[in-house]
Structures are given as C-alpha cells and as structure tokens.
Image (cartoon, helix red, strand yellow):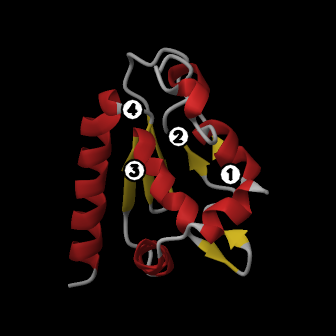
Amino acid sequence: MKLKDLFKENNNLILETLIKDFHNTNKPIAAVGYGILMLFHAFEKNNWIFSKYNLTGISINEECREVYFSNLPFLIEESVRELDGNFVAQSNPNQSFAIVDKNVISGQNDNALLFVLNNFAFMITKQFLYNL
C-alpha cells in the first residue's frame, strides 16, 4: 500500500476540511515537530496540496533516537518527500529551525516553537490589518 493511500484511507474528514479551508483561503497554518502529520490528511484530486512546499518536522536523525523507532509505520521526512514535498532539516536538533513557505510555518522540533509562534502571530496580524 502506498503512503498516499494509507493517509487517504485513515483520513480525518474534519481535519482535512479545516486544513483545506485554511489553505484555500491563504490563512496561516503552523506545525511543529510531529504536528506536521496533520498536513498529511489534505489531498485534492489524489494530489497532496502541500506538494512542492518546503517543510520541516522531526527528521530521520531525530526519529531514530526514539525508543519506539522500530514500531513507526513511516518516517515523516521520507513521507514528505514521497508526497512530493521538499523536506528540509537542521543537522543539529538542538538548534532552532523553522521554515515559512507561503502560508505554512513549520518547525523541526520543540526548539523552534517560539520562532513558529512569533511568525504565526505576525501572519495573523498582517492578514487582519490588510483585511480591515
């Protein structure tokens, strides 16, 4: 079974609808670490809506250090690439690393949380001010 089919089969319709709505209306979307998994639910016409986006999340380097690594059904980094996204990660997981691509802000791990929140707040404020 292909990864795309796995996500489509186990799809959360509410989450999918919410993400698609935010994406289609250009509202900011933020994910940190494993939170990037929520984006794997958003497909339109059999294509992932975040293909070609630069994204980050927990890297293979970080996942392989987890106790439950051998039980993971897939790896986030490989999944983003398989779905035709561009996964970028910092080699030192202790440094803060985040990416902003269009309306999506993604942070590699908890160290990037402050950066992601600041950018998310900025995007919301900017959108609010321009819509007055």
Tag 1 near tag 3, CB within 8 Å: no
Determine the residue positioned at 40% across, 78% down.
14
Please tell me which of labels 2 and 1 falls first in the chain: 2
Q: Which residue is mark 3?
A: 31
Classify mark 4: helix, strand or loop: loop
* Whether residue 24 is situated above or below residue 105 in the rendered picture: below
Q: Which residue is mark 4?
A: 109
Q: How many marks?
A: 4
Q: CA distance from mark 4 to mark 3?
A: 9 Å
Please tell me which of labels 4 and 3 falls first in the chain: 3
The amino acid beneath tag 3 is: Ala
The amino acid beneath tag 1 is: Gly
Q: Which residue is mark 1?
A: 85
* Coordinates of residue 82 in the picture (x, y in percent): 75, 49
Mark 2 nearby-residue class (10 Å; few <14, some 14–19, many ≥20):
many
* Coordinates of residue 62 in the picture (x, y in percent): 51, 22
Determine the residue positioned at 64% across, 41% down.
74
Q: Which residue is mark 2?
A: 56
Determine the residue positioned at 49% across, 26% down.
68
Please tell me which of labels 2 and 3 falls first in the chain: 3
